[in-house]
Image (spheres, rainbow, N blue to C red):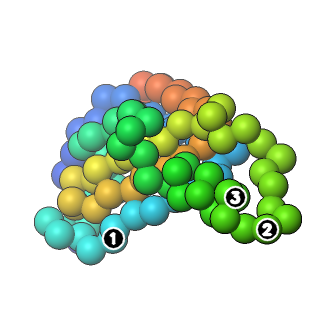
Amino acid sequence: EDISKRFDAKIKYNINFIDIIGFYGTSCDFWGPSPYICDFEYIKKEDQIIIPKLKKHGEETPHFEFEINLDDYLETRMTFISGDRLRIACREIIIDAKPCVDNK
């Protein structure tokens, strides 16, 4: 069964993550499969996981140097209706909202 047929979405969002440097997620479909996001949040610096790990790796690895400034990057987390979570570290996010014509 295609669960997306049950929802009458009025707006379709395209979320574009620019210059992704890392991601982490859980995919267990705790509450059943779903492509829908119920929460999208910015992660404060003190709660970030991915960017601090990259910084630590850069500091601990001899002859390793980032060609980017990690302070220019942000971390976000999406929680899906299924209960799955996806955390993404990137430089920029562009969200495009359009009226949904055909509910796809």
CA gap between label 2 and label 1 equals 34 Å
Q: Position of residue 18 (x, y in %)?
A: 66, 40
Residue 27: image tag: 1
In this view, the residue in front, 30 or 4, is 30
Q: Which residue type does callout 2 highlight?
A: Pro
Q: Quadrant of the N terminus?
A: bottom left
N-terminal-most mark, 2 or 1: 1
The location of residue 50, given as percent across then percent down, is 50, 54
Q: Would you name the residue on which mark 3 appears?
A: 58
Residue at the image position 62 percent from the left and 52 percent from the top: 55
Name the amino acid type tagged 3: Gly
For label 2, the SS is: loop
Question: Which circle, 1 or 3, is nearer the viewer?
Answer: 3
How crowded pointer 3 is (Cα within 10 Å; few <14, some 14-19, many 20+) is rated as: some
* Res. 59 image quadrant: bottom right
**96 horizontally vs 46: left or right:** right
Query: Circle 2 is placed at which residue position?
Result: 62
